Every structure is written in structure tokens, then in C-alpha cells.
Image (cartoon, helix red, strand yellow):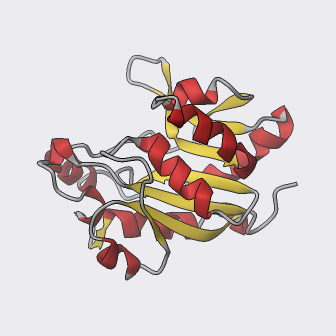
Amino acid sequence: MIGPGDITGLVLAGGRGSRMGGVDKGLQDFQGAPLALHAMRRLQNQHGGLVGPLLVNANRNADVYETFGAPVCQDTIADFAGPLAGFLAGLANCKTPFLLTVPCDSPRFPLDLAQRLAEAVLIEEADIAMASAREEDGQYRVQPVFCLMKVSLRDSLIAFTKDGGRKVDRWAGLHRTVHVAFDRPTDDPLAFSNANTLDELRSLENTDPIP
């Protein structure tokens, strides 16, 4: 059973923002709020109240992120090592049985993300659940940074990264991992769209209202 508050939500905002010209992506405005704050609010509003505490993984402007009301955890691996470094920072600061990660640059992610990933973990007796979504070509693509994981996996991730591992899918492949398709007729087709550039961010702002 995964009950209300059993999941800590982690917003991943620790990247370089290279394709946005090196800006701090999580602090870019989206419909009147910084992207990271927007993500935090969607985590707070997850169905079933499953997400309790929140964390932000950021490697710059920690003082600004702290004003959003959640603890900021920095990578312990140098040189912007990618999502797994953020996962590791979150696991080190997580006090609940599960950690749910979301990137800061996908402002439409589903409000039932935690609920559906948690259901899959229980049904499949899995250690990790990741979202997947259908692409324009009809193929499904795993969204590895939308990831629910057991906090007990921390030692595994420490060992994997110490050996130089940096790929989320390779680490997840060491454990029982389930992929959860978000393909119901009522699902937002843009739920996992992300903004890698400022043009993509403005384009997302001009799409249909977020469900």
C-alpha cells in the first residue's frame, strides 16, 4: 500500500540549460511562474495526495529556489552529471519510502502521474515505475525522468554512479522496472512535452490550457 504522503516529489532543475543558452531553466517563466515552481505545484496537486514532502535538485541559484518553499539539494557528483545525479541527491534527502522525480521543463505532466506509477509498482511488485507516451510516429517512448522509485535503491545507485554509470535506463535495468503507458483517451497528448529551448517554451505556453 502506498498511502497519502508516502512519496517525496523531486523537481529536477540541476542541468546546464545548454540548449537554452546556458540559462537556469527552472527559473524561466511559464504562464506567470518559474518552471520549477510550476512543477512543484503540480506535484502538490497530485491525485490522492500521494506526494507529501517536496525537494528541488538545483546546482545554481539555490537562494532563489529556496524561496519556493522546498529544500534544495545539490548534486554530489561534479560537472552536471545528468538526471542520475539528481536522483541520487533526492534519495539522499528523502524521508519517505518512495521518491518521484519530474523534470522542471515539462509543465503539463499529469496530475495522476504519482497515482498511476504507484499502482503499477504495487501490481507488478516493481522497484521502479517510469512513464511512457506515444510519439507522433505511433511508437511508445519511455520518459525515464518521470520516475517513481523505492528509496531503498539508494545504495545501488551510489555503486552504479561510482563506477561511472550515467544512463538512467541502464541503472533501471538492474532492477525490476515497469513502464506505464499514458495513452488513455482522456490523457493530454502534450503531457510529457518538454522545453529544451526558449522557442519551445513559448510554444508550450501557446498551446491549449493545461488539464
Figure quadrant of residue 104: bottom left
Residue 119 place in picture, x, y as percent: 78, 45
Judge left or right: residue 197 versus residue 40. left
Residue 55 place in picture, x, y as percent: 52, 67
The answer to whether residue 14 is visible is yes
Figure quadrant of residue 58: bottom left
Residue at 66 percent across and 46 percent down: it is 154
Residue at 17 percent across and 56 percent down: it is 23
Judge left or right: residue 81 versus residue 115. left
Judge left or right: residue 52 versus residue 200. right
Height in image: 27 above or below 2?
A: below
Residue 102 place in picture, x, y as percent: 49, 51
Residue at 73 percent across and 69 percent down: it is 5
Height in image: 114 above or below 42?
A: above
- Most extreme residue toward the left is 21
Height in image: 70 above or below 22?
A: below
Residue 61 place in picture, x, y as percent: 27, 70
Height in image: 110 above or below 28?
A: above
The answer to whether residue 184 is visible is no
Q: Dividing the image into 4 quarters, which one contains the N terminus?
A: bottom right
Residue at 46 percent across and 81 percent down: it is 69
- Most extreme residue toward the front is 162
The residue lying toward the viewer, choosing from 172 and 179, is 172
